[in-house]
Amino acid sequence: MATLEIRDLHVSVADGSDGTKEILRGVDLTVKAGETHAIMGPNGSGKSTLAYAVAGHPKYEVTSGAVTLDGEDVLGMSVDERARAGLFLAMQYPVEVPGVSVSNFLRSAVTAVRGEAPKLREFSKEMKKAMDDLSIDPVFAQRSLNEGFSGGEKKRHEILQLEMLKPKVAILDETDSGLDVDALKVVSEGVNRFASGDTGVLLITHYTRILRYVKPDFVHVFAGGRVVAEGGPELADELENEGYEKYAKAGASL
Ligand SMILES: Nc1ncnc2c1ncn2[C@@H]1O[C@H](COP(=O)(O)OP(=O)(O)OP(=O)(O)O)[C@@H](O)[C@H]1O
Ligand SMILES: [Mg+2]
């Protein structure tokens, strides 16, 4: 059973002048295969920073703490090694890569994760089937990565990557703001399908909207770079009704 463990994680970024600013101030979190966790919290509370730090983004410096996947030290791994170990990160703002097609990107990603390039014909078949299952138009495979993608298309592409890469743990940082109901449903169905299998899902979200479609097993509330409250799905309902105010105060006073 795959387990991602985050222990007392402290993360800093360069503050633009000469110093650094601590964003994460001791985060503890455990995600096991088959579980869905939601991380919720006000804007600027450090949710995306957690995703970037686990992904190995060079701007985010881990100053102390540990991240392990099945006991293996994730922080010592290169970005590629993290993917190969079974981590998948979908970012809040995916980069546009003109000139690199969706199909080329997916083949490189699959090659990185599996450790060898899949045979072209088998890969094409696999990709066609996954796209078909997600009702993605076949011409999409030839589009440039993320260029001009609508919110819904970006989300479909995210779930297509999940299908192809079959990670042990997926961290999805959701821009629920720009998403229409169609896009929300695509993500939700994808997440629900994965979470019922062997994948552990960490769903990062500011709004509770997506949680009408995805029922998390655990909800963690972030404020001021820490987890300030934890509970089951009822916590998401409480946040929907009452907002983050009381937790924002808790984060500031820690
Ligand atoms: N690369 C960076 N350089 C400078 N400051 C940063 C950087 N990344 C994050 N921060 C700061 O860290 C804090 C947390 O940002 P983060 O993006 O993790 O918040 P968030 O919880 O994901 O917010 P949102 O709900 O708006 O997506 C913010 O104050 C932000 O300005
Ligand atoms: Mg964010």
Image (tube, grey):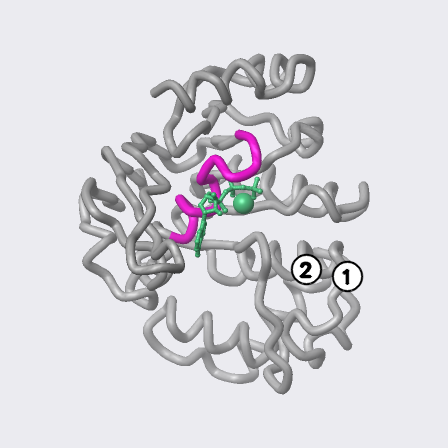
Front residue of 13 and 182: 13
Question: Which residue is rendered at x = 35% and y = 53% of the image?
Answer: 13
- Quarter of the image with the N terminus is top left
**47 magenta-colored:** yes
Q: Where's residue 166, x and y in %?
A: 46, 55
Percent coordinates x, y for residue 52 in the rendering: 41, 53
Question: In this image, 238 relative to 34: left or right?
Answer: right
| Above or below, comparing residue 249 to residue 5 in the picture | above
Q: Please provide percent x and percent y for residue 184.
A: 73, 42
- Provide the residue designation for mark 2: 154
10 Å neighbourhood of mark 1: few (<14), some, or many (≥20)?
Answer: few
Image quadrant in which you'd find residue 61: bottom left
Would residue 128 be found to the left or right of residue 89 on screen?
right
- Residue at x-position 68% and y-position 42%: 176
Q: Nearer the viewer, residue 2 or 101?
A: 101
**Amino acid type for the residue under numbered disc 2:** Lys
| Magenta stretch, residue numbers | 41-52
Q: Which mark is residue 150?
A: 1
Residue located at (25% from left, 44% from top): 67
Nearest to the observer: residue 134 or residue 129: 134
